[in-house]
Image: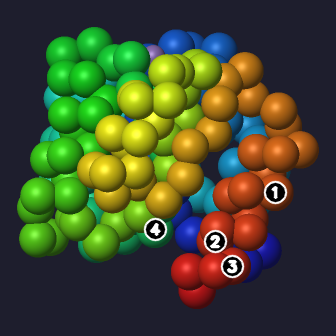
């Protein structure tokens, strides 16, 4: 089967991680995973050439999601990788910060599976 692209999931909650992974694999994406902000930055540094999209939780151990986003966007090697935030319903100011940092979309938890699939697929088709 043709693979649709590689997505990095940054998520520390095991059941959320499993849900997102299962959805993406069922949709024929390939996934890599990071369970805290530090691992996320290390993973991106090693794999940035093959990562098509990053799904980013905000509440993360070690380094918070917004800080990770800022570091990705301030690194010339990684700044063009699109980032979609996947996080619990946050204050509008937090969501605004994500967009200001350069994220392309914000998906609210708990994840609505149909909506999630639709957003990822729409986004993916838009970028290829
Ligand atoms: Mn979290």
Does residue 86 show up? yes
Asked if marks 3 and 2 touch (Cβ < 8 Å), the reply is yes
Instruction: Determine the residue positioned at 48% across, 59% down.
Output: 104
26 up-or-down from 18: above or below: below
Left or right of 16 in this view: 67? left
Is ligand 1 less than 8 Å from the beta carbon at label 1? no
Asked if marks 4 and 2 touch (Cβ < 8 Å), the reply is yes
- Is tag 3's residue or tag 1's residue first in the polypeptide sequence? 1
Distance CA(mark 3)–CA(mark 1) = 11 Å
User: Which residue is label 4 attached to?
Assistant: 52
Instruction: Determine the residue positioned at 57% across, 69% down.
Output: 5
- Is tag 1's residue or tag 2's residue first in the polypeptide sequence? 1
Instruction: Determine the residue positioned at 56% across, 43% down.
Output: 106
Residue 101: percent from the left, percent from the top?
Answer: 28, 50
Distance CA(mark 1)–CA(mark 2) = 10 Å
Distance CA(mark 4)–CA(mark 3) = 12 Å
Left or right of 12 in this view: 42? left
Distance CA(mark 3)–CA(mark 2) = 4 Å
Binning the other alpha carbons within 10 Å of mark 2 as few (below 14), some (14 to 19) or many (20 upward) gives some
User: Which residue is label 3 attached to?
Assistant: 125
21 up-or-down from 80: above or below: above
Asked if marks 1 and 4 touch (Cβ < 8 Å), the reply is no
User: Which residue is label 1 attached to?
Assistant: 118
Label 3: which secondary element? helix
Q: Nearer the viewer, residue 103 or 39?
A: 103
């Amino acid at each position: 089967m043709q693979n649709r692209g590689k997505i990095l999931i940054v998520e520390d909650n095991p059941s959320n991680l499993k849900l997102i992974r299962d959805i993406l694999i069922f949709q024929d994406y390939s996934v890599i995973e990071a369970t805290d902000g530090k691992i996320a930055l290390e993973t991106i540094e090693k794999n940035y050439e093959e990562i098509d999209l990053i799904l980013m939780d905000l509440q993360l151990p070690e380094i918070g999601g917004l800080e990770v986003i800022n570091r990705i966007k301030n690194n010339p090697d990684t700044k063009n990788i699109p980032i979609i935030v996947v996080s619990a319903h946050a204050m509008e100011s937090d969501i605004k910060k994500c967009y200001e940092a350069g994220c392309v979309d914000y998906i609210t938890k708990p994840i609505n599976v149909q909506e999630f699939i639709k957003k990822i697929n729409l986004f993916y088709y838009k970028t290829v």
